[in-house]
Image (spheres, helix red, strand yellow):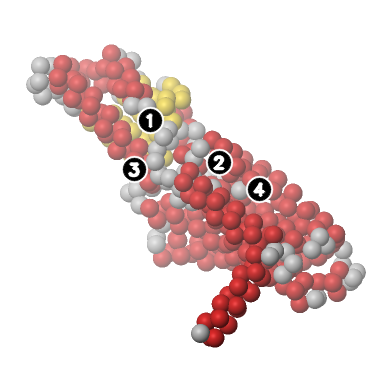
């Protein structure tokens, strides 16, 4: 009985140590609620909107009926009509549409002659899950179109419309083609955040940070010294993941290594800025680790790593603009899978540079003012 009382007293003491700090109470409650909401809204493979471009070279009654059925499904949203497939392809490259529906000029004459009428559907398969789902929905729309024509013909077998699906950037719709290029950025960010978050917190806990502050080094010089090493380590880890992706799994790289590394450099600098800010406000290594893991989960969920940003609620899509991982993954995927150049992914650099421009000076200011 005495043993149980002593153990109970120790348990009460440990709970008081954890709960007496207001910051600990917030960390124990708020992240759980926030992450539950994020999982419920952001981590979803449900398709609620598929923007597509229409290339209708038939301009016939049959093609109009088919496009009307596509729009009536409630899932597909026609955002542009274009006369050329090359213009539609550019929209796919720029991410404005997820799908292109191309109807040939002889669509209706083929149906009237009793021949199979092909309709080409081009899918943006950089995310294989959403591409496969969109393809399946499109097959259902065409099946209903064929059934309606058969019923109008008195129940006889009507000439079918055949869907010819082409998946760009991932011809076989393999999941690893979607995941592994994204891991080049995301896995390195995890290590970079941990390293930078612990850098200042470790010295503060060991008592050497005060000595560093009284050296001739300015806060800017301390910032640069603390940032360069994690950047190099992050790029090295990205290289290892890149080699595994390319040579172990054999996923072909369409873009140039130079463009990938330029994108990774900007992304890593932005990540280091966040990590140094965390480190500067953390009194010890335990706080630094806890703060890091509190923000890692939202960053991963709102990055588009597994679920596309376009399927998230509008308010969460806006929140992703302060997430460097979203733009790091997007630029690496586009360079690796579709062969995009730096000029194409340059819009991803703007928010990354903005995040770095805010977090790095913030970390330097926190170093100088020592808020903890």
Q: Is residue 329 visible?
A: no
Q: Is residue 23 left or right of residue 39?
A: right
Pointer 3: what residue? 132
Where, quadrant-wise, is the C terminus in this rendering? bottom right
Residue 295 location, x and y as percent?
Answer: 61, 56
122 and 79: which one is in front?
Answer: 79
Specify the label residue 316 is tagged with: 2
- Marks 4 and 1 sit apart, C-alpha to C-alpha, by 32 Å
Q: Are marks 2 and 4 in contact (CB under 8 Å)?
A: no
- Marks 3 and 2 sit apart, C-alpha to C-alpha, by 24 Å
Q: Earlier in the sequence, mark 2 or mark 4?
A: 2
- Marks 2 and 1 sit apart, C-alpha to C-alpha, by 20 Å
Pointer 1: what residue? 75
Q: Is residue 255 left or right of residue 57?
A: right
- Marks 4 and 3 sit apart, C-alpha to C-alpha, by 31 Å
**Residue at 51% from the left image edge and 47% from the top image edge:** 37
Element at label 4? helix
Hey, which quadrant is residue 229 in on the image? bottom right
Nearer the camera: disc 2 or disc 1: 2
274 and 248: which one is in front?
Answer: 274
Hey, which quadrant is residue 348 in on the image? top right
Q: Is residue 116 left or right of residue 327?
A: left
Count neighbours of disc 4 (C-alpha within 10 A) and say few if under 14, some if 14 to 19, many if 20 or more. many
Count neighbours of disc 1 (C-alpha within 10 A) and say few if under 14, some if 14 to 19, many if 20 or more. some
**Residue at 72% from the left image edge and 72% from the top image edge:** 202
**Residue at 70% from the left image edge and 45% from the top image edge:** 354
């Amino acid at each position: 009985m005495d043993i149980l009382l002593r153990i109970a007293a120790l348990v009460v003491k440990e709970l008081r140590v954890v709960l007496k700090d207001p910051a600990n109470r917030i960390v124990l409650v708020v992240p759980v609620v926030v992450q539950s909401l994020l999982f419920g809204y952001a981590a979803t493979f449900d398709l609620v909107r598929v923007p597509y471009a229409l290339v209708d070279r038939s301009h016939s009654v049959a093609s109009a009926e088919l496009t009307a059925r596509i729009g009536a499904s409630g899932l597909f949203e026609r955002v542009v009509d274009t006369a050329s497939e090359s213009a539609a392809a550019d929209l796919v490259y720029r991410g404005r549409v997820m799908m292109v529906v191309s109807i040939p000029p002889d669509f209706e004459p083929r149906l009237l002659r009793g021949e199979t009428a092909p309709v080409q559907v081009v899918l943006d398969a950089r995310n294989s899950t959403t591409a496969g789902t969109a393809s399946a929905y499109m097959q259902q729309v065409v099946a209903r179109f064929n059934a309606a024509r058969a019923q109008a013909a008195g129940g006889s077998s009507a000439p079918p419309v055949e869907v010819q699906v082409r998946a760009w950037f991932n011809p076989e719709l393999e999941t690893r083609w979607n995941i592994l290029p994204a891991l080049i950025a995301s896995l390195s960010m995890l290590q970079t955040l941990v390293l930078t978050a612990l850098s200042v917190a470790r010295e503060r806990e060991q008592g050497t940070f005060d000595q560093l502050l009284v050296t001739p080094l300015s806060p800017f010089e301390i910032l640069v010294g603390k940032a360069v090493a994690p950047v190099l380590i992050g790029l090295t880890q990205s290289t290892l993941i890149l080699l595994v992706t390319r040579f172990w799994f054999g996923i072909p790289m369409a873009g140039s290594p130079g463009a990938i590394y330029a994108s990774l450099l900007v992304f890593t600098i932005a990540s280091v800025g966040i990590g140094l800010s965390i480190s500067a406000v953390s009194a010890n290594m335990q706080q630094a680790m806890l703060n890091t893991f509190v923000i890692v989960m939202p960053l991963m969920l709102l990055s588009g790593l597994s679920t596309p940003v376009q399927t998230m609620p509008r308010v969460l899509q806006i929140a992703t603009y302060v997430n460097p991982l979203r733009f790091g993954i997007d630029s690496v995927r586009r360079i690796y899978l579709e062969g995009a150049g730096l000029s194409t992914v340059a819009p991803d650099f703007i928010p990354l540079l903005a995040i770095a421009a805010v977090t790095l000076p913030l970390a330097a200011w926190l170093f100088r003012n020592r808020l903890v």
